[in-house]
Image (cartoon, rainbow, N blue to C red):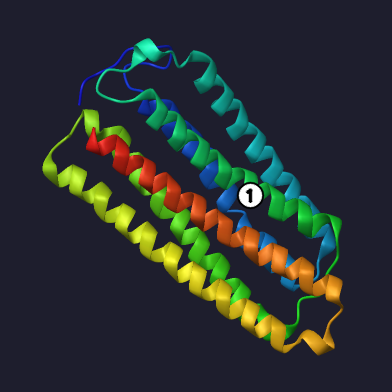
Amino acid sequence: MKTIGGPFGRSPFGPLREHILKVKDCIELLPSLMKAFLEANQEEIKAIAKDISKEEHAADQIKKRIREHLSKSLFASIHRADVLAMLKEQDNIADVCEEVGMLLAVRKTELPKELAALLIQTVEEVTQTVLLVCQASEKLVKLEEDSSDRAIHEIYDLIESVQKKEWETDSLQQLFLEKLFTLESQMNPIHIYFLMTIIKQIGEIANHADNTGDCMRRILAR
């Protein structure tokens, strides 16, 4: 892969790696947020939501720096639009993590015990999906040092794993909703809508991770 100069160094992937590490910091707080939600610990929810917002803001600042310094002249073999698309999808992961935290912080909602295991399982799958994207991003950065077929295939394998995890997350999201509606007669309609929104947003995190993988595919195909 051709080396490319610029304000961040020789490779355009260095700042993307810096950004995805902040995204990783956001997603790693999500299981703790859900644990606090299950325990109805509103103070802990607010504290973790604040931490997620802090990490999201840091990711946003990196995103702005990349966009400000990313000139069209920087790219030869790598298309600027592909890099910006990947940056956008990475940033969406952090944005949605923050939104989930904010929703849980502003409204106290009881989660029926029948839904607890499914929610935790879904969050675990989503977290693993994003962590796989982070691994792929790390390997993408290292391609300038080792652009062998083996190294490239490792990234493709990780992207395939991300797609599988995203599908599994969709399945769990469907199961959660089906179970939620069996409890419909026992619940406040606003609670139902709120939980629908939360599970949808959690699923969106996995969707953005999958989209990030698709952006990597396009970059590798150039």
- Residue 170 vs 6, above or below: the answer is below
Q: Is 182 placed left or right of 29 in the picture?
A: right
Tell me which corner region of the image, top left, top right, bottom left or bottom right, holds residue 10. Answer: top left
Expressed as whole percent of the image width and height from the top left, the position of residue 73 reads 36, 10
Expressed as whole percent of the image width and height from the top left, the position of residue 143 reads 23, 34
Q: Is 211 placed left or right of 10 in the picture?
A: right
Residue at (50%, 55%) from the top-left corner? 207
Q: Residues within 10 Å of mark 1 (few under 14, many from 20)?
A: many
Amino acid type shown at disc 1: Val
Expressed as whole percent of the image width and height from the top left, the position of residue 129 reads 45, 58
Task: Provide the secondary structure element on which disc 1 rests.
Answer: helix
As drawn, the residue found furthest toward the left would be 149
The reply to whether residue 112 is in sight is yes
Name the quadrant of the C terminus: top left
* Frontmost residue, 63 versus 174: 174
Expressed as whole percent of the image width and height from the top left, the position of residue 55 reads 63, 39
Query: Where is mark 1, residue-wise?
Result: 96
Residue at (86%, 65%) from the top-left corner? 108
Name the quadrant of the N terminus: top left
